[in-house]
Structures are given as structure tokens and as C-alpha cells.
Image (cartoon, helix red, strand yellow):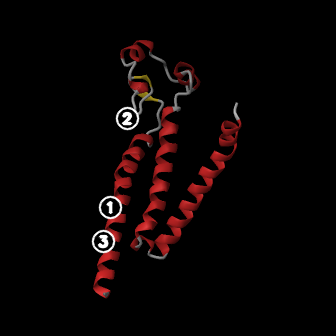
Amino acid sequence: MSAITAASVIFLPPLILALVALSLWKTGRGLAARGWERPGWWVFPAVVLASAGCVTWYIGVFSGGFDPEETCRERGVRYDNAYRTEHAREPSQWFPLRNKCHAGHDLVPAFVNPTLVAVAVLLPGCAAGAAAAHATVRKKHATQH
């Protein structure tokens, strides 16, 4: 392992966690102080949403473990090999996330796909909020001069 790889493995996760924690704090403070009126504030909720989306996607992708058959049996659910063979592409698709033991039981938690949709809808909303805040600030600045 090179020194750069080792340094990134050691220092990158705490930096990412610090960025998410800072964004959560700045988002909460901005809500209390009408921060949404400043275009730059919208970066913080976007970081929080993107982080929530990544964590949710990670939970969904790895919900079946590395051996779905074993995971199904551990949870007391029948594993249908014929169903899995017929729907072999489902566990590898990006969206919607599915990893079924049989037609009636999905290993992916029920909250995963709706959360991913909400994040996909709200992230462009952050961009729209920033654009609206910029237009408002620009309009206020133009009327003052």
C-alpha cells in the first residue's frame, strides 16, 4: 500500500464525517436564522441529503450480505433458487434496489427505495432554492442602487 493510499484510508473517513457533521449543524442553524435567504447556505442541506442518500443506498445494496441464501436462512425465510435464477438481474440493478429470497420477501428494507426517491427529488430542490435565493439577493441589491 502506498503512502498516499494509506493516508487517504486513514484521514478521508474522519474528514467526510466532519463535513457531514458541519453540514448538519449549519443546516440546523440556518433554518433557525433564515439562512435559506443566502444562496450559499443551500450547499449544506445538499451535502446532508447526498450523505443520507449514499448511506441509504449502501444499506440497500448490502442488505442481503455477501451470501443472500445464507441471509435468507438466518432470517427464517425460505430461499427460492428457481426464483433467484429467473430474476438474476434484480439484485444488481441500481434502482429500485431489490434482493429477494422469493417472490414475497425482499431483503432490502422498505424505507430504502422511497428514501432514494425523496433524495433525488430534494437535491434539485436545493439547487432551485439556491437559484431563488440568488435572484432575491440580486433583486434586493438592484433596488438599493
| In the rendered image, the vertical position of residue 108 relative to residue 12, given as above or below | above
- Residue at the (56%, 21%) spot, across then down: 67
| In the rendered image, the vertical position of residue 55 relative to residue 72, given as above or below | below
Between the C-alphas of marks 2 and 3, the distance is: 35 Å
Give me the disc on residue 106.
Answer: none
Disc 3 residue type?
A: Ala
Disc 2 residue type?
A: Phe
Element carrying mark 2: loop
Residue 119 in percent (x, y) is at: 40, 50
Give me the disc on residue 128.
Answer: 1
- Marks 2, 3: nearer the viewer: 3
**97 relative position to 142: left or right:** right
Residue 27 in percent (x, y) is at: 50, 65
Give me the disc on residue 95.
Answer: 2
Crowding near the residue tagged with mark 2, few <14, some 14–19, many ≥20 C-alpha atoms within 10 Å: few
- Marks 2, 1: nearer the viewer: 1
Residue to which mark 3 is pinned: 135
Disc 1 residue type?
A: Ala
